[in-house]
Image (cartoon, rainbow, N blue to C red):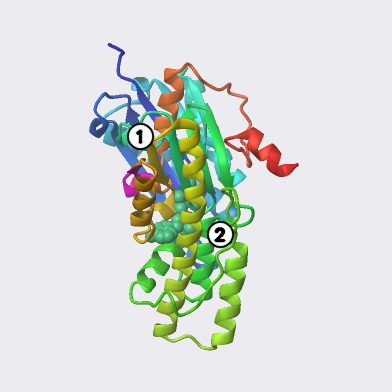
Amino acid sequence: MVAAMLVLGIETSCDETAAAVVEDAAAPEKRIRASLVLSQLAEHRPYGGVVPEIAARAHLEHLDGLIAQALREAGAGFGDLAGVAATGGPGLIGGVMVGIMEAKAIAYARGLPFVAVNHLEGHALSVRLTDDVPFPYLLLLVSGGHCQLLAVEGVGTYRRLGTTIDDAVGECFDKGAKLLGLGYPGGPAIERAARTGNAARFPLPRPLIGRPGCDFSFSGLKTALAETVRRAGPLDERMRADLAASLQAAIVDCLLDRGAHAAAQFTARHGRGHALVAAGGVAANAVLRPRLAQLAAEWGLRFVVPPADLCTDNAAMIAWAGIERLRLGLTDPLDFAPRPRWPLDPAAALRRAS
Ligand code: KG4
Ligand code: ZN
């Protein structure tokens, strides 16, 4: 019997200040002792996107209080912790520095192990916090900053099958919503407006569909939407709904086409019977989910999506990745330098750069 392990997680890489206390319990429903997310949406909304300087200052202002509150809710003190994990990148560097400095200070003062977690690894492993999903599995990571297909083969072992060559998919939703005057964040706004829209009214391009490989591209789609909006003149409600539905349909088609290629590659290497996992904010999309479930079924994969609050940015996933690493004896030195860029699969990143 291994002793229970309590880990503090800190997430500050974008526009959410988050702190969580997660336990290495046997039963998944007992693991999250506290998970707090303080959204900065209101502070960034006037600008239609995240302003790095505002984000870093807000993290600095709120993080101490949030950690204290998370510990209170968990009924724990610093003395009960087995380690401190914080997002070490990739992300907005000012914010990452705030979280990492705080984690190092706690670790140093309390003599605790420190783990710098790759934010993408946090998303990649989050499903194992709530579901029994063994390695390997296929992951579609779709968020405001990332759009990747990964074979998750073990803690620290990720094979990137595809990534975006320009914008992230969430960015495409956000910029599309801005063009349509639907507000920020764009994904939920597009999904809402699209419910009453006709997805066939505006034929938008599906970049890279039909081409080999698993990479994504969304900038051409965004430009095509901008052009369509310009030609359409002043938008009424009907037009907005139809444009939102057309954009959402094009995005989902792209994700599915690339996903099918990835499923083919993944099952050729690992066989059937594993899981297809979707994570990141865009995985909340109600049109995308059933299509992915269908894709998984076609390839003999089980479709799993973590609960919505674990799909979007949070600190429980960072604490959990910390637990997975601590179990393997993987810790980081206190001179760890925050990384604005930090690919999960460095070999794939080098192939792309060359
Ligand atoms: O994972 P996340 O919370 O933050 C990071 O970017 O790391 O993802 C946020 C992104 C935003 O671009 C948002 O517009 C998108 O996820 N999103 C959605 C939906 N909910 C959030 N996109 C499409 N449909 C949704 N229902
Ligand atoms: Zn994220």
Q: Secondary structure at mark 2?
A: loop
At 50% from the left and 44% from the top, the residue drawn is 262
How far separated are the C-alphas under marks 2 and 1? 27 Å
**Lower sequence index among marks 2 and 1:** 2
Whole-percent x, y for residue 319 in the image: 41, 32
Q: Which residue is mark 1?
A: 273
| Position of 320 relative to 44 (above/below) | above
At 66% from the left and 39% from the top, the residue drawn is 349
Q: Amino acid at mark 2?
A: Ile
> Is 312 left or right of 214, judged from the image as shown?
left
Q: Are marks 2 and 1 in contact (CB under 8 Å)?
A: no
Residue 60 in view of the camera: no
CB of mark 1 near ligand 1 (< 8 Å):
no
Q: Which residue is mark 2?
A: 209
| Position of 108 relative to 54 (above/below) | above
Q: Which residues are magenta?
A: 303-310
> Is 190 left or right of 162, judged from the image as shown?
left
| Position of 258 relative to 70 (above/below) | below
**Residue 327 falls in image quadrant:** top left
Task: Tell how many labels.
Answer: 2
Foreground residue among 206 and 220: 206
Q: Amino acid at mark 1?
A: Gly
Q: Secondary structure at mark 1?
A: loop
